[in-house]
Structure formats: C-alpha cells, structure tokens
Image (cartoon, rainbow, N blue to C red):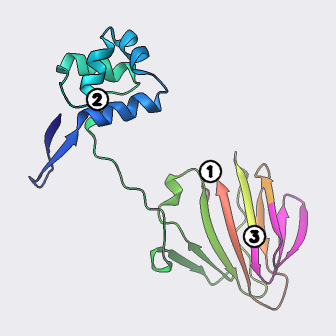
Amino acid sequence: MLVNKEFEIGVPMQIEIGEKLKQLRLRANLTQEELARRCELSKGFISQVERGLTSPSIATLVDYLECLGSNLQEFFQDPVKQQVVYKQEDAYTAENEELGHIINWIVPDAHKNTMEPITVRLRPKGQTEEYNPHAGEVFGYVQTGAITLHIGKNHWRIKKGDYFYYTASDSYCIKNHTVNEAVVLWVTSPPSF
C-alpha cells in the first residue's frame, strides 16, 4: 500500500508501508508467525500487509509498530541522510598563534557524535592547550614530525608513523619539541575539543 505524505514544500512523497513494516520485522529478527502472535493477528494478514495487498487500520498499525519497538512518529519520519564522505572544504579551522597550533575539525559537527576527529598542526615549539581529564578515550597518530605527549606528570616522545591511545583520566596535551612542523590526527571519545 502506498501512502502520500506531504512534505513541508507541498510535494507529496509515497511511502511503501508494507515494505517498511517488513524491514522493521526483519531488523527485529522476527518471522511473520512470531510477529502475528505478538500482535494477535494472523500470519496471513501480516503477509498481505507486507506485500501491499491490504492495509492495517491506524489502531492495528500502532499495535504492530509497538511490537516492533517503534511508533507512528518514527515510522513516518523522513530518514536523515548521513554524510559519509567529507572533503577538505568541509573542515573548520581555528588558529591559536600564542600556543602555535592550528586545529582542523575534519568532520563538521562531530561534537554531536560519539567521537570527534581533528588534525592538529603544531608549529616548531608549539603546543595544544592542556585538556582536563574526562570520562573517555583519546587516540592520536603522528602524520608528520614528532611530538611529546604529556599525560599528568608523564610524557612520551612520539615520531612520525607512531600513535598513542589512552583513557583521559589525567590532564593532557601535546607539544612539538622540534624545530620542524608536526601534524597529528587526534580523536577523542566522547568529543572534548
């Protein structure tokens, strides 16, 4: 069954209810028979709905969706298209001349996600701010140059091609101890930059 759904701009879009319900059922790892038992419907009715031969009443659709862990609002909501590939021009850059670093947020709005990747360009003798401890993890990969990683009272020298990974239970920062520029791919989870 096709249902017309009005977009805000007034252009109707057709939604295939049966196919969408079938996808929800498969995601829930249920057979038609199992779903029919949960919804107190017949397996034949479930089959007909999924093939678009009949349509459920609103009350039945509400029960159907509840058994599948969904609701009417989620079911009829337009799927949000996730950006997967990012280009250099998508990035946001901020420079701190005093500390001698440039931070490049390579995934815009990543602070809303589970992790936040950035690149840090450290000028010779440059460094990042000192970040406070937080409940999370930090990963870094030195792309060019060499750095010193400071975690609490400890520090490690890390060169091009090496990487670091730690829980952020102490304050931390990175410094460029050399006379050449250094670039680090740095990822925190949850976001903290």
Most distant residue in the bottom direction: 179
Residue sitting at x 26%, y 32%: 18
Q: Amino acid at mark 1?
A: Pro
Q: Check residue 137 for magenta coloring.
A: no
- Label 2 Cα neighbours within 10 Å, binned few <14 / some 14-19 / many ≥20: many
Mark positioned earlier in the residue sequence (1 or 3): 3
Residue nearest the observer in this picture, 135 or 72: 72
Span highlighted in magenta in the image: 141-164
Residue pointed to by mark 2: 50
Residue 59: give x, y in percent of width and height: 21, 16
Q: Check residue 157 for magenta coloring.
A: yes
- Tell me how many marks there are: 3
**Is residue 84 among the parts visible in the rendering?**
yes
Residue sitting at x 73%, y 65%: 130
Q: Tell me the chief SS of the magenta region.
A: strand
Residue 141: give x, y in percent of width and height: 75, 70
Image quadrant containing the N terminus: top left
Image quadrant containing the C terminus: bottom right
Q: Amino acid at mark 3?
A: Tyr
Residue nearest the observer in this picture, 21 or 185: 21
Which callout, 2 or 3, points to the residue nearer the camera?
2
Tell me the distance, in whole angstroms, between the alpha carbons under discs 2 and 1: 40 Å
> Callout 3: helix, strand or loop?
strand
- Label 1 Cα neighbours within 10 Å, binned few <14 / some 14-19 / many ≥20: some
Residue pointed to by mark 1: 190
Residue pointed to by mark 3: 141
Residue nearest the observer in this picture, 121 or 171: 121
Residue sitting at x 15%, y 37%: 3
